[in-house]
Image: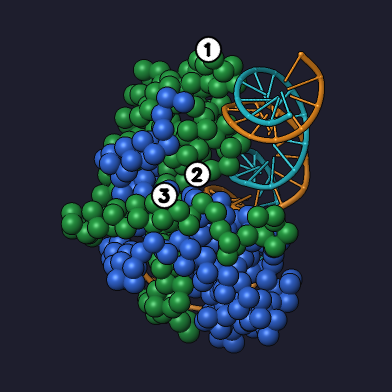
Chain colours: A green, B blue, C cyan, D orange
Amino acid sequence: MRYETDDILRETFSSDLRYLMAASFIVLANNQVSNRFFEKDYGMPVHAWSALYAVVRFPGLLARDIQSLFPRPQNSISRAVSLLRERGWITTRTNEDDSRAKHLFPTDEGRRVLAEIEARVLRRQDEIFGGLSAAERDQFLHLCRKVIEGGGLRSSDALRPTDDPQ
Amino acid sequence: MRYETDDILRETFSSDLRYLMAASFIVLANNQVSNRFFEKDYGMPVHAWSALYAVVRFPGLLARDIQSLFPRPQNSISRAVSLLRERGWITTRTNEDDSRAKHLFPTDEGRRVLAEIEARVLRRQDEIFGGLSAAERDQFLHLCRKVIEGGGLRSSDALRPTDDPQ
DNA sequence: GCGAAATACATCCACGTGGATGTAACAATC
DNA sequence: GATTGTTACATCCACGTGGATGTATTTCGC
């Protein structure tokens, strides 16, 4: 082998794109683990758990609200919601004033399943950030929130497809 | 609407899973933008650009080395490498001592395409982290590297599928 | 050195993804 | 109050994904 893995990583995390590369690495590595887990143990895509999390935490929210918390295409959310309903983990109630809107509520079983998953995801979070002190974790969170609130995240001038209108 | 988007985000980023949720948000939001860009403007999945980046930056590396930098399933890398070769952006040379291994090298055209993309991704990085000062960016990078080097990332006890052997 | 295990990569195929489009309902403009 | 635009969600379908498996080669154990 001409390149050592450690060299590749060290050099890449020192390059111009180091911030993006380091963040991507964390994400990709974690996805490998969590995708597999949710598929194998719960027979569902990761985004179904995200949606369930949102519904349990914010009962009565709409599908479009889930989208604001977990930025995914609208049809992915729609599919996830359908799945949760088929499993009997959530119920829906059409808004009285706006019949397009469906409020989502967790069932008792849905809450139970979420609690079970959430406990494991919490342990997973500890695994990932275990190397950081409490202060460093807070620092990390602070920086993430600053990036999110910066607003450059959801839309882009740099990566707008060339044939895309403003 | 019963929940304000800002309330949902603020409350979630204060919950037990705040570290994971904040990091996920950044990733998902960015993916929306970059997936679309690479698909539309270059007719290729994001991981093809990742692979091209790796080959240009580390000429002669193997497909399995790409995997250590961009943690993805082996077949995804294999597909990306095939695509790059079809487009004439990389060439391969079989290792003399181990005929299973193929060293990957960028073509001139491959380097040109990468330079073009990289310039835009660099601008994208600035958009994302534009809200952070230089010191904060370095702090962010430092924390990411610490998480990566912590080692809890690539495998998991918490999210091991129950029927999986150690 | 021979069989077993491991490694590098390719291929198969069921399934999830996401852009595009459809449907229905509400809102705005005049 | 008809037209136009927008919003909430569902559905379609081409394509990428990734676990499983295959193939060839190399290495390990004894």
Disc 2 element:
loop
Question: Which residue is pictured at 57% across the width and 80% down the height?
Answer: B56
In the image: residue A161, left or right of residue B165:
right
Distance from Cα at disc 2 to Cα at disc 3: 9 Å
Most distant residue in the left direction: A134
Q: Position of residue B157 (x, y in %)?
A: 31, 48
Q: Chain of mark 3?
A: B
Disc 1 element:
loop
Task: Tell me which amino acid carries mark 2.
Answer: Pro
Q: Position of residue B68 (x, y in %)?
A: 45, 68
**Residue labelled with disc 1:** A96
Q: Are marks 3 and 1 on the same chain?
A: no
* Label of residue B24 in the image: 3
C-beta proximity under 8 Å, tags 2 and 3: no
Q: Chain of mark 2?
A: A
* Label of residue A71 in the image: 2
Question: Which residue is pictured at 50% across the width and 44% down the height?
Answer: A71
Question: Which residue is pictured at 51% across the width and 59% down the height?
Answer: B72
